[in-house]
Amino acid sequence: MGKKLIQPVCTQAQQNEGIRLIARAVTAQHPEAMFTLGTPLIRDAAKETEEQLGLDYIEQSAQLGHTHAAAFLGAHLMSVSRTEDQRDQAFLWLGLAANDGSVLAAMTLSQLYKSGMHGVVQDRCAAALWRETAGLLQNPDMDFSPQTDVACK
């Protein structure tokens, strides 16, 4: 209910009640509430401390098995990564989310390997395999085998 009350069409009083309900659910370690509260904190952060609080909520949500939180966290960490350890952490979250059914995470991994962005070593085979995974997640009855021009060895 809290998530519905924080919509822009709701009055300020309704939004305040929605935030109170979400905060209560966060206290009870509800992963969806943590994701719901963390996302706007990161997006609208006026201060670094607000962004960090949002990331903490997202990470807690991901640790509790929330697939969208893991995908979000992985993509965010990849976008700000500066070291190999940070990229490894981002890959961990993206891989967990993709293996848990996130098409977005699988496509993100495919694009990272295809483009070589953020210090990722280009790997056409890995890109094709993650693209195939994304296709299978979208439609498990279709054949999304890697293209024949990509040889995975």
Image: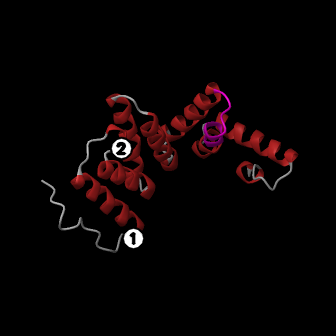
Q: Hey, which residue is sitting farthest bottom in the picture? A: 142
Q: Residue 36 sits in which quadrant?
A: top right
Q: Is residue 153 magenta?
A: no
Q: Residues within 10 Å of mark 2 (few under 14, many from 20)?
A: few
Q: Secondary structure at mark 2?
A: helix
* 113 is higher (above) or lower (below) than 135: above
Left or right of residue 84, residue 50 in this image: right
Magenta stretch in the rendered image: 39-47
Which sits earlier in the primary sequence, circle 1 or circle 2?
2
The mark found on residue 33 in the picture is none
Residue 45 lies, in percent from the top left, at 65, 34
Q: Residues within 10 Å of mark 1 (few under 14, many from 20)?
A: few
Q: Which residue is mark 2?
A: 117
Which residue is rendered at x = 81% and y = 56% of the image? 9
Left or right of residue 126, residue 17 in this image: right
Q: Are marks 1 and 2 in contact (CB under 8 Å)?
A: no
Q: Residue 103 sits in which quadrant?
A: bottom left
Q: Is residue 44 magenta?
A: yes
